[in-house]
Image (tube, rainbow, N blue to C red):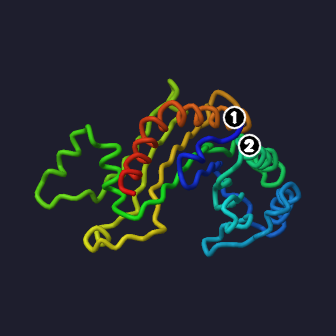
Amino acid sequence: MSISFNSLCDDFYVNMTLNTELELPSDRDTILHFFERIQRQYPTMNTFYQRESGDFCLDEDRESGSYRWICIEKDRICSGIVNPESFEQVDQLNKLILEQIPFALGVNHLDINSLDVMFGMDFDYEGNHDEILAEALFQSTPFVSLLDLPNSKPLGFDPAILVSLSEDCRLQARISVESRTGAYQVRTGKYKEEDQISLYLSVRQYPDPAKQFNCMESYENQRHVSIELMTDRLVPSFIQPIVGAIAQRR
């Protein structure tokens, strides 16, 4: 399945995060063996480094505009693809990781705290991001009435919403929009060309204590749910209004 979301934004990316109850292994041989297994499948993932925080990362060339990355942190494994060509490409990476972690990192169903699938979009805009979001998302709400106050300007219109998608509340969706405009920029009118408005949809699954957690089945369901939410809810109600508000100022 090709990805149509790319055409709606300047950057589109899909991340997966597996959160664990116990700390993950950090010894040299274990980490290198895991990344070597991933690199055999993706030879272009050849940039390996350790952050000051102790996290271990393996990336493709980030300058290419479309790249894969993996990071092993203290108690979570993160991966993602920026500007993927298809969801098959996304699934191949994430499923390979889920297949390898029981053997390479010793993670089993008892150790899993939650699994996240996150869709992200970035929109280029050199100007007041909060003004865009206020117009696109708050125009018909009581919040916009605050902009009628003397000298009032949008400074913090960053909505974040958490909803349950299952009766037991173990499947959840978080939708958030992030502005990168600060009071100094609004006051001076000096905005950064590289700053982006970001929209995130994160679908999280918590294990059911009555069942053995199956990472692969959960991932496939969460990815399916994420696509449905993006297509049916976020594109018409969030993304298109943001794109339209930006277009009016260009």
Residue located at (14% from left, 61% from top): 151
The C terminus appears in which quarter of the rendering?
Answer: bottom left
Give left or right: position of 126 versus 43.
left
Give left or right: position of 27 versus 7.
right
**Is residue 100 visible to us here?**
yes
Element at label 2: helix
Examine the image and state in which quarter residue 65 appears. bottom right
Residue 166: x and y, percent? Answer: 52, 27
Examine the image and state in which quarter residue 212 appears. top right
Looking at this view, is 195 or 116 the one in front?
195
Q: Which residue was labeled with disc 2?
A: 91
**Tags 1 and 2 touching, CB below 8 Å:** yes
Element at label 1: helix
Compared to residue 234, the image places residue 185 above or below, namely below
Task: Please identify, in this view, whether the residue under mark 1 or under mark 2 is nearer the observer.
Answer: 2
Give left or right: position of 207 versus 196.
right
Q: Amino acid at mark 1?
A: Glu
Residue located at (50% from left, 24% from top): 167
Residue located at (23% from left, 44% from top): 143
Compared to residue 94, the image places residue 29 above or below, namely below
Residue located at (69% from left, 58% from top): 66
In the image, farthest residue toward the top: 167
Per the rendering, the mark at residue 220 is 1
Residue 43: x and y, percent? Answer: 85, 61
Examine the image and state in which quarter residue 23 appears. bottom right
**Callout 1: 10 Å neighbours few (<14), some, many (20+)?**
some
